[in-house]
Amino acid sequence: MRPDLEVADIFRSAGPTYRAAHAGHLSLHQLKVMSAIETCRTAALGGHVEACEDCGHWRVAYNSCRNRHCPKCQGAAARTWLAEREADLLPVGYFHVVFTLPAEIADIAWQNKALVYDLLFRAASETMLTIAADPMRTNRKSAVSPLSASSRLTASPASSLKLSASIGNWSPRSMS
């Protein structure tokens, strides 16, 4: 069943205005993704006829864009991936932690990504390990390791730099 409103509907109605307002600021890749999502499962990509041999009922099925960013094409794959990641988690509560650098440092970080990102990851990791090891700050053991696999770094020249990490907290009782 088709939802009332899809990303493609929003792109088709507001996309031209958005692209015009952000001309020169959208990459070719971003424009291609928008175009793929807009044309996904429409006559623009062609289609085929599916017919029932028993009752003779037929319908036109339009081809998909197969773009990895398209919610129609990758919805099932995303749900499968998410279920697999959730199966990897311990049965405990998690906390989302964000480390942010001031916007004034964003330009420096944008020009020196490897150096600044390395410093940010090390500082964030050391901070979390120090806090987790302090019995005055927590009454449970924290499952904190140096930030890498479960962390995400986002940055743009006009914004501050942020490091997001998911940290799991557990106690010996929660494992039973």
Image (cartoon, helix red, strand yellow):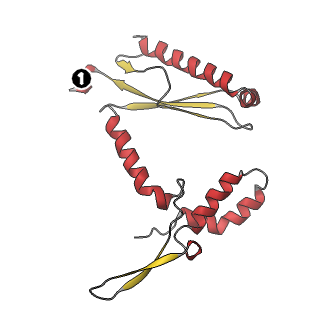
Q: Residue at x 49, y 19 (%)?
A: 128
Q: Position of residue 164 (x, y in %)?
A: 54, 32
Of the residues shown, which amino acid type is indicated by label 1?
A: Arg
Measured along the vertical axis of the image, is residue 171 above or below residue 35?
Answer: above
The quadrant in which residue 98 appears is top right
Q: Residues within 10 Å of mark 1 (few under 14, many from 20)?
A: few
Position of the N terminus, as image quadrant, is bottom left
Instruction: Name the residue at the right extreme.
Output: 24
Q: Position of residue 127 (x, y in %)?
A: 53, 16
Q: Residue at x 68, y 33 (%)?
A: 160
Measured along the vertical axis of the image, is residue 92 above or below residue 5?
Answer: above
Q: Is residue 99 left or right of residue 4?
A: right
Q: Residue at x 39, y 17 (%)?
A: 138
Q: Residue at x 52, y 53 (%)?
A: 68
Instruction: Name the residue at the left extreme.
Output: 176
Q: Position of residue 59 (x, y in %)?
A: 42, 82
Q: Position of residue 136 (x, y in %)?
A: 42, 11
Measured along the vertical axis of the image, is residue 43 above or below residue 73?
Answer: below
The quadrant in which residue 75 appears is bottom left
Which is nearer the eye, 84 or 98? 84
Identify the residue position indicated by label 1 in the image: 173
Measured along the vertical axis of the image, is residue 56 above or below residue 137?
Answer: below
Give the mark count: 1
Position of the C terminus, as image quadrant, is top left
Q: Which element is circle 1 on? A: helix
